[in-house]
Amino acid sequence: MLARLSTKFLVPALLGLGAVLACLPAAAQLPAPSQAPAATEANYAAVRPMIADMQKIVTPNGIAVSERVALGGLPQWISIRGADRRNPVLIYVHGGPGATEMGRSWPYQRGWEEYFTVVQWDQPGSGKTLRTSGEAANRSHLSRTRMAEDLVALIEHLRARLGAEKVVLLGHSWGNVIGLDAAMARPDLIAAYIGVGPLFALRANEEAQYRALLAIAATRKDDAALAELKAIAPYPGLGEIPFDKVNVVRKWVMAYGGLAAYRDNADFYFRAARLSPYYDLADRQAIDAGGQLSVPALLPDMAAVDHRRIAATRFPIFMFLGRHDITTPSSVIEPWLRRLEAPHKEIVWFDHSAHLPPHEEPGKFLIGLVEKVRPWATNKAITAAHP
């Protein structure tokens, strides 16, 4: 188990387990995604309509909606965007918990929309869903089981609305937990599954992070890092993981480019929502509030997860992994994938990414989606294998 979480140190910063436990000693060490100088907020508001116009879907069979749908009795926000409704449906299951992608997806998603009908979903306890349905109603949905059920309900809703037989699921970081849960519960609805920087097993993740940081620090002869990291040994150890130790690990994950490759921060990611055509200031503030609400509520479920127990899937499975990801190290995922039985399984590597490949290598990510995944969603891959 993890030590008691002190939410006053919570910053919605590092996604997935990296995110859930991204509790640095002071929130000022990282930029809060919703905060901006008051004088510049009007400037952001002036730019958003320009971006919205650039990204407007104008094709005759296109779709571009942002709306609430009732999932498990809770009104939840989704966006649906695509140039052709006949394209395969792809659902992005965001990380965090609480790290919504709807407001941060605009820098890369427009290309996806030429080949997929892309659905962004603000999960319970996050973003627009938290803002409009309120804390009490959202809190009742904050469990791994309930959120996976909500995701299955969303898939069923989209099948009825868009006429899709199956969907592509993309689970990023924490999103892999409920994404893979939903896919395993209803494999008949899944055309293909994509894990992006996926969280698979919490304690194994912490152990792999720690080993990776020690190795990097030793290679760089970084005496300060080595001293701090060796001082918290054994990590994670047995039983609860003290948060003062977690803070040290997260500090060096960020400093060594383990969240965003070649960077010691991820400002470009956190601040993207400021210019989003789909999010206003109150929506952005709900990202922060969502982290504060969701992380403590979901920590027990996070501590229990171990998807390495999955031995087989009935759907093709892709892992889109950043070479530099220390947030959710690939060393936890590769041995599992080698053992897995699946119609197709494949790792797509992103050599210049850490934990945020869609943002870090958007062109390569799009090519991977189109060349690797889309054929399975259009049955072309199946036809090629069995002519």
Image: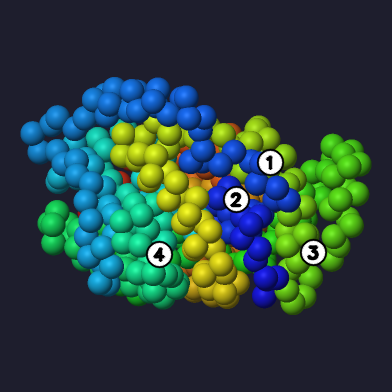
Residue 259 lies, in percent from the top left, at 61, 43
Task: Tell me the element at label 1.
Answer: helix
Residue at (43, 29) in percent of width and height: 41
Q: In the image, which disc is placed on residue 29?
A: 1
- Residue that label 2 marks: 11
Q: In the image, which disc is placed on residue 135?
A: 4
Q: Quadrant of residue 165?
A: bottom left
Which of the two residues, 281 or 98, is positioned nearer the viewer here?
Answer: 281
Task: Tell me the element at label 4.
Answer: helix
| C-alpha distance separating marks 3 and 2 | 22 Å
Local packing at callout 2 (Cα closer than 10 Å; few below 14, some 14-19, many 20+) is many
Contact between labelled residues 2 and 1, with CB atoms less than 8 Å apart: yes
| C-alpha distance separating marks 1 and 2 | 9 Å
Contact between labelled residues 1 and 4, with CB atoms less than 8 Å apart: no
Kind of residue at badge 4: Glu
Left/right of residue 167 with respect to residue 359 in the rendered view: left
Residue at the extreme left: 60
Quadrant for the C terminus, please. Answer: bottom left
- Residue that label 3 marks: 235
Residue 374 lies, in percent from the top left, at 30, 46
Residue at (77, 49) in percent of width and height: 213
Kind of residue at badge 2: Val
Q: Nearer the viewer, mark 4 or mark 1?
A: 4
| C-alpha distance separating marks 4 and 1 | 27 Å
Q: Nearer the viewer, mark 4 or mark 3?
A: 4
Task: Tell me the element at label 3.
Answer: loop
| C-alpha distance separating marks 3 and 1 | 23 Å
Q: Nearer the viewer, mark 3 or mark 1?
A: 1
